[in-house]
């Protein structure tokens, strides 16, 4: 507004000067061709022309869109002769006309491109004479109607509709001006109540019966065009009584004769499932422990047996090596020390285990008074020898 007022300041000063000098005051008449109707997305041309009793050298042309309450508000476009066009960006934004409105070549008429339904309303063209003599501004209103043709949309019902229930069919369209709606059956049958058609955007079928199933047609008409939608209604029959979800509990009788209704038993299925899961996990852990223990025990026994086998093999190999070396005995073997040079005297015979002497293979039985062992390896008594001088 500051920009608009600053641009009009020189013209106002000139107007005041002309009035002081007694110049003739012009009378301006503004006209237009009438109301304008366009379809959505089309271009709307809002024409404005004027005549004056005195030829005007300087004038201003302002365009407004009236508010819903009829007030004028601020102009969104202003043109002053031989001056740049002034546009109020804030007002254009409020009206949704940014980048869509402009002056035509006559500098009085305007054009609105890509019209939409919110553009519908009353536009005012105001001409204010400035030179010569100034004068009283004159205006004319143009009613713009942006027509939106009907596009029928059938509101869907639940997938299942049952008999003896109220069923409502809804027909909608985003038309402007608003549409009227007519319902009929495609097969020509009568609607509920006996009528062949029904007017209104909702068709109600109270306590529907199976014969109400079929195709219904909705026609929307807003005076500029029509559109049709068809809906297929399917009804299902069902019994009015529902089977019990569980068998009734048996009745019990007290000792005194009073009947007592047993309390329903509830099963904590959640607890049972949790218990089964925990038991299964415990069994798995126990089985894994037993398998682990058996494997470790078997492995330990195998290792011990293998170690013992290795030791025995090593000892056998050592003894075999000593025999091959001629020693006949392992290096660790020590000959037993004699206990006594004299044999122990006993009654009758001596125990040869206490006598240290040459082996049986080294004795010369021909030179000694010693009898060789008998066929059974004995000499009278097992492992006893008769020595000379002893009994």
Image (cartoon, rainbow, N blue to C red):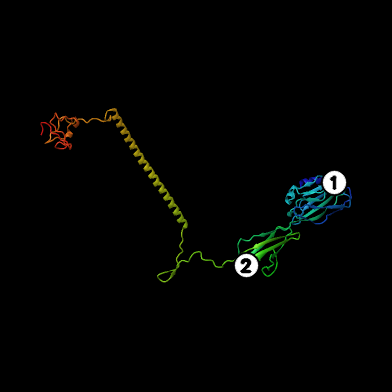
Q: Quadrant of residue 190?
A: bottom right
Residue at 43% from the left image edge and 52% from the top image edge:
280
Residue that protrudes farthest toward the bottom in the picture: 257
Query: In percent of the image, x 36 and y 40: which residue is there?
Result: 302
Q: Please report the residue visible at 83 percent of the width from the left and 51 percent of the height from the top.
A: 127
Residue 368 horizontal side relative to residue 94, left or right: left
Q: Is residue 280 left or right of residue 388?
A: right
Q: Quadrant of the C terminus?
A: top left
The x and y percentages for residue 209 are: 62, 68
Residue 343: image location, x then y, percent: 15, 32
Q: Determine crowd level at label 1: few under 14, some 14-19, many 20+ residues with C-alpha closer than 10 A.
A: some
Give the camera-side residue of 97 and 83. 97
SS for callout 2: helix
Name the residue that disc number 2 marks: 210
Looking at the rendered structure, which numbered label has been put on residue 14? 1
Nearest to N terminus: mark 2 or mark 1 = 1
Viewer-nearest of labels 2 and 1? Answer: 2
């Amino acid at each position: 507004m500051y920009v608009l007022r600053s641009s009009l300041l020189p013209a106002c000063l000139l107007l005041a000067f002309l009035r002081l000098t007694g110049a003739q005051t012009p009378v301006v008449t503004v006209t237009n061709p009438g109301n304008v109707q366009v379809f959505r997305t089309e271009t709307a041309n809002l024409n404005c022309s004027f005549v004056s009793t005195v030829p005007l050298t300087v004038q201003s042309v302002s365009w407004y869109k009236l508010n819903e309450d009829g007030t004028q508000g601020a102009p969104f476009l202003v043109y002053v002769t031989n001056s740049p066009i002034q546009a109020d960006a804030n007002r254009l934004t409020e009206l949704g006309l940014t980048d869509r409105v402009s002056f035509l070549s006559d500098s009085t008429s305007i054009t609105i491109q890509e019209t939409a339904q919110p553009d519908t309303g009353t536009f005012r063209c105001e001409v204010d004479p400035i030179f010569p003599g100034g004068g009283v501004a004159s205006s004319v209103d143009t009613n713009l109607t942006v027509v939106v043709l009907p596009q029928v949309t059938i509101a869907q019902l639940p997938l299942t509709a049952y008999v003896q229930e109220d069923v409502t069919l809804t027909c909608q369209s985003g038309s402007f001006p608003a549409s009227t709606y007519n319902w009929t059956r495609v097969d020509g049958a009568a609607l509920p109540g006996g009528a062949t058609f029904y007017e209104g955007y909702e068709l109600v079928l109270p306590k529907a019966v199976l014969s109400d199933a079929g195709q219904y047609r909705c026609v929307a008409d807003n005076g500029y065009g029509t559109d049709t939608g068809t809906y297929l209604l399917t009804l299902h029959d069902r019994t009015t009584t529902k089977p019990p979800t569980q068998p009734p509990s048996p009745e019990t009788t007290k000792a005194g004769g009073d009947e007592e209704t047993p309390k329903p038993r509830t099963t904590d299925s959640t607890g049972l499932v949790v218990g089964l899961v925990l038991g299964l996990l415990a069994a798995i852990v126990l089985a894994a422990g037993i398998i682990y223990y058996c494997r470790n025990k078997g492995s330990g026994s195998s290792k011990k047996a293998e170690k013992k086998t290795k030791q025995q093999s090593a000892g056998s190999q050592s003894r075999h090596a000593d025999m091959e070396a001629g020693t006949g005995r392992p290096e660790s073997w020590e000959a037993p020390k004699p206990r006594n040079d004299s044999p122990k005297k006993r009654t009758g015979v001596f125990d040869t285990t206490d006598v240290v002497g040459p082996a049986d293979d080294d004795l010369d039985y021909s030179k000694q008074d010693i009898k060789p062992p008998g066929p059974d390896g004995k000499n009278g008594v097992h492992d006893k020898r008769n020595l000379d001088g002893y009994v």
